[in-house]
Amino acid sequence: MGGTEHDAGHGTGHGAGHGTEHLTVRREGATLVLTLNRPEAKNALSLPMLVGLYDGWVAADEDDSIRSVVLTGAGGTFCAGMDLKALAGKGMEGEQYRDRLKADPDLHWKAMLRHHRPRKPVIAAVEGYCVAGGTEILQGTDIRVAAETATFGLSEVRRALFPIGGSTVRLQRQIPRTHALEMLLTGRHYSAAEALSIGLIGSVVPAGTALGRALEIAEQVNACGPLAVEAVKASVYETAEMTETDGLKSELERGWPIFATEDSKEGPKAFAEKRPAVYRRA
């Protein structure tokens, strides 16, 4: 099952993102690392995993000392999707979390980033299988690093199922439609090289190094002005479906207030003084 790490420490509410038996949480500086931790089932989604994920996103949103989130999987696998045995009526682990689902029937969709977009940049570090629900969660992340041995795909149609985690909407907006339809309608698996070539992921690294590379990218994000980073991310998503005219208007509304912050003065000052900037979210 794997133990739970309790060193997230700074968050508030919803268990402060302390993890569950299937989701571990730890801090790496200003980065919150969420690890899908059910390797014996290729990190197939479970109720404890979904509850832990949701709490992790909330903790990252509420804790200003967290500047980025890295999502990865334990045991050399990212996520093999929904637990098909549970779907077939074999019982779902984590009955003790059932009250959380009753209190918020949308919790699983928020956990999978279908109905929730974290304020902070989310970087996926993929090793091994990232298929079905794994590829669906991937589409909710912002930056994606994969090992050369990683495998992607939306295999739902092969089981006469529907990829209802958002893929029929999001995938065609993230990669060319012909590639999206081929992935969705064949259910076949894609290598990391092929996923890179169609734009599903941003970089491929040697096996076993995806998390290290994701943490390097997170450090680069963390060194930037946090208010600027969050505003830029918000603007990208807000304007995605707007006309260019409306998008440019929206960008000004998001962007101009950043120039009135203390951080926006600190950045150029630190550059002129040849020292690292100290940003205070002010």
Image (cartoon, rainbow, N blue to C red):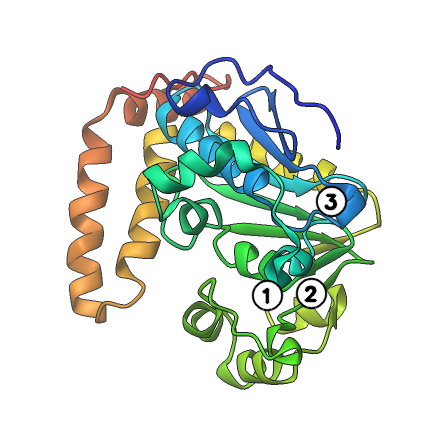
Distance from label 2 to label 1 (Cα)?
Answer: 9 Å
The alpha-carbon separation of the residues under discs 3 and 1 comes to 15 Å
Question: Residue 210: which numbered mark, if any?
Answer: 3
Lateral position of residue 76 relative to residue 247, left or right: right
Of marks 2 and 1, which one's residue comes earlier in the chain? Answer: 2
In the picture of the structure, the residue carrying the numbered disc 2 is: 152
Check disc 2 and report its element: helix, strand or loop. strand
State whether residue 36 is above or below residue 165. Answer: above
Foreground residue, 275 or 155?
155
Q: How dense is the environment of label 3, judged by Cα within 10 Å: few (below 14), some, or many (20 and up)? A: many
- Residue situated in front as seen by the camera: 47 or 42: 47
Going by the numbered disc 3, the residue's amino acid type is Ala
Residue under label 1, please give it: 200
In the image, what residue occupies the spot 63% across and 63% down?
A: 88
Distance between the alpha carbons at the discs numbered 2 and 3: 15 Å
The residue drawn where x is 58% and y is 19% is 29
**Residue 251 position in % (x across, y down):** 22, 52
Q: Position of residue 172 (x, y in %)?
A: 46, 75
